[in-house]
């Protein structure tokens, strides 16, 4: 057990899917895993371990924002030995072609800051996805004819931005969508020599203001979960 995760040693699988929403973790475990067992309830941050097509896998909430994800990812990697971490999250589309329910595979994650900014000082580290996971996820997405985009995303510290100029510049430079965790996940993966990827579903659009309701964000992004599972075990 750690401060934030109540799982016993051995109860977390090598591969961990990480949605921001703990209730998405519960729904996905019940929907896609065989023999799903709840392994964490501390602070309501649900984690489940089960099997998918015979592979042992955990899904564990990260909470919203990089500081929260950093706590869980650090403990999952350092204390429980997780080796593959795949964020399965919602994102706001930036580009005209990133439409609601499209899949975005985050090849890189741009940010203004991350919890690791203080250690990098003047260095602008480029947080990147694991190429093997990224290419496997792309194959899985195209095999099921998903509308999929691969590229740069924005990992933001704010959901309600007061800096529309950031959105404008990032959009102008081809950034696909905004979310709040991937950059720090990729940095932690690099630091600890493990694999990471963010598989996202567009839940709203920053320019058009179209948006899916919270129930859909919790319980309807199954395509993203299956792509993540197929990528992890290919
Ligand atoms: O749907 P999740 O995975 O929580 O991801 C996105 O949704 C939350 C904001 O609503 C942030 O965590 C953002 O990254
Ligand atoms: O961070 C996020 C996630 C989903 N949608 C947004 O607009 N922002």
Image (tube, rainbow, N blue to C red):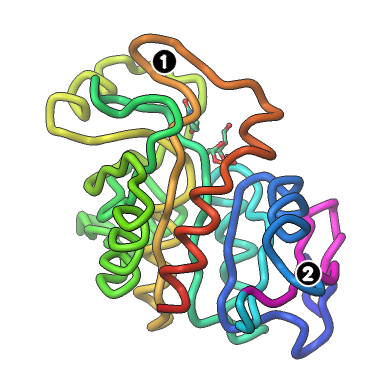
Q: Using the rendered view, name the quadrant where residue 110 is placed.
A: top left
Assign a secondary structure to mark 2. loop
| Whether the residue under disc 1 has CB within 8 Å of ligand 2 | no
- Please tell me in which quarter of the rendered image ligand 1 is found: top right
Segment colored magenta: 36-52
**In the image, is residue 192 part of the stretch drawn in magenta?**
no
Say which quadrant the C terminus sits in. Answer: bottom left
Estimate the spatial distance between the alpha carbons at disc 2 and disc 1, rounded to whole Å: 34 Å
Residue drawn at x 42%, y 80% is 194
Q: Is residue 157 left or right of residue 103?
A: right
Q: Residue at x 32, y 69 (%)?
A: 136
Secondary structure mostly seen in magenta is strand
Closer-to-camera residue (173/98): 98
Q: Position of residue 142 (x, y in %)?
A: 29, 53
Q: Residue at x 59, y 59 (%)?
A: 18
Give the crowd class for mark 2: few <14, some 14-19, many >=20 residues within 10 Å.
Answer: many
Give residue 40's quadrant in the image: bottom right
Q: In the image as oriented, which residue stretches furthest toward the front?
A: 144
Total labels: the figure holds 2
Residue 43, magenta (yes or no): yes
According to the picture, the residue beneath numbered tag 1 turns out to be 162
> Residue furthest toward the top?
208
């Amino acid at each position: 057990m750690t401060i934030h995760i109540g799982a016993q040693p051995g109860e977390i699988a090598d591969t961990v899917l990480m949605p921001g929403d703990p209730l998405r973790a519960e729904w996905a475990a019940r929907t896609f895993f065989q023999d799903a067992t709840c392994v964490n309830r501390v602070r309501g941050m649900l984690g489940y371990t089960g099997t998918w097509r015979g592979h042992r896998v955990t899904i564990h909430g990260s909470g919203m924002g990089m500081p929260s994800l950093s706590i869980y990812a650090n403990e999952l990697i350092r204390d429980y030995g997780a080796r593959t971490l795949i964020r399965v999250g919602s994102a706001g589309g930036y580009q005209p072609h990133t439409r609601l329910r499209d899949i975005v595979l985050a090849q890189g994650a741009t940010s203004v800051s991350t919890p690791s900014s203080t250690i990098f000082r003047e260095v602008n580290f480029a947080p990147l996805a694991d190429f093997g996971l990224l290419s496997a996820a792309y194959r899985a997405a195209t095999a099921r004819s998903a509308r999929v985009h691969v590229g740069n995303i924005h990992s933001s510290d704010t959901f309600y931005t007061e800096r529309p100029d950031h959105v404008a510049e990032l959009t102008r430079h081809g950034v696909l969508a905004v979310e709040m965790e991937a950059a720090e996940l990729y940095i932690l993966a690099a630091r600890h020599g493990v694999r990471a990827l963010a598989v996202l579903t567009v839940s709203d659009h920053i320019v058009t203001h179209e948006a899916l309701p919270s129930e859909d964000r919790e319980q309807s992004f199954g395509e993203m979960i299956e792509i993540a599972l197929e990528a992890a075990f290919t």
